Each structure stands twice: as C-alpha cells, then as structure tokens.
Image (cartoon, helix red, strand yellow):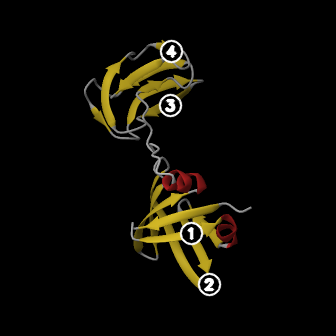
Amino acid sequence: MSKSFKTSVNKTHDFDFTEAQIEALDIVEKSKNNYHVLEGNQSYQATILQTNFNKKTYTIQINGNTYEVSISNELDMLIDELGLEVAAEKKENDIKAPMPGLIVSVDVEIGQEVKEGDGILVLEAMKMENTLQAPRDGVVKSIAIQAGDKVEKNTVLIEME
C-alpha cells in the first residue's frame, strides 16, 4: 500500500500525491537545494529556498516563481479529520548538553530574545567545537553554566520561556 500526501500551495491550491507518484518523477539534483525536474514533457528548475521541518512547510522557487508549500502525511490528515490538534512546533524549554564537554562560550544573556536556529553557546566535545542552536523562538529565562564549565550529557544548560 502506497503512502499518500496532501500538499497545499500558497494556502489556495491543494494537491494529493501517492508515494508511487513522487517516486515516478524524473528529478536530478544539480547542487544543494537545486533540482531539475521533468514531468509530462515539461522541464522545471526547482530551488528549495527555506525549510521548516517542524511545521512541514517549504518555500520553493520553480522556474523563477516562488511558492509556499505545506505537506501533510496520512497521520496529519487523520488528526485533522478527527478535529484533534497537535503542536507542530517544538516546545522545548530546556537546552541540554547533547554530549559531555567543555563550555567554550555562552552567546546569550538572560532576558534576550532568540529565534529558532540562533547560536546560543559553543560546546567543545571530542576536540570539536559544536554550536548549540535555539530549538525555537523564545526568551532566555536562565543560564545554568558559564564559559569554562565542564558538563555531562543531558545537563540543563539554558532554560527558555
């Protein structure tokens, strides 16, 4: 049984696809986020401009035209059909150490607003510096560490609200 997907383009046009239809497309990756697509004897140049995996939304440019696309899978459609609501965004309040290491720098202050993806601190682990990013938009509520601190895996480093 093939999986099915529903897409909404610019919140005005809806399309249904099966996994088999997607796999049948002739798509060649030209470079990162740039694709050449052949469909029904038509050639398309596609570029993925922006992605939000949590919300399953994408900004795509096709032959110079920009489109906002959202994708729903079977579970998303069932939840919607039942009238249930599931938070698509991460609601993480604690930023924890993903591995043991040494805090190199803390790049935020208490009360500072951060956007999803902003670098908030640098953790050195296994002789590599890793920039930890904000998992969502929010405000820094507390900072439990400072530069020079050694931390263990899952230690709470920063709390957000």
Instruction: Give the amino acid at mark 1.
Output: Asp
Report which residue position mark 1 lands on. 16
Q: Nearer the viewer, mark 4 or mark 1?
A: 1
Report which residue position mark 3 lands on. 130
Say which mark, if any, is on residue 8. none
Instruction: Give the amino acid at mark 2.
Output: Gly
Q: Nearer the viewer, mark 3 or mark 4?
A: 4
Q: Earlier in the sequence, mark 2 or mark 1?
A: 1
Residue at screen point 32% across, 35% down? 138
Say which mark, if any, is on residue 151. 4
Q: Earlier in the sequence, mark 2 or mark 3?
A: 2
Q: Position of residue 55 (x, y in %)?
A: 45, 50
Instruction: Give the amino acid at mark 3.
Output: Asn
Report which residue position mark 2 lands on. 40
Distance from disc 4 to disc 1, alpha carbons, whole Å, reads 48 Å
Q: Position of residue 62 (x, y in %)?
A: 47, 73
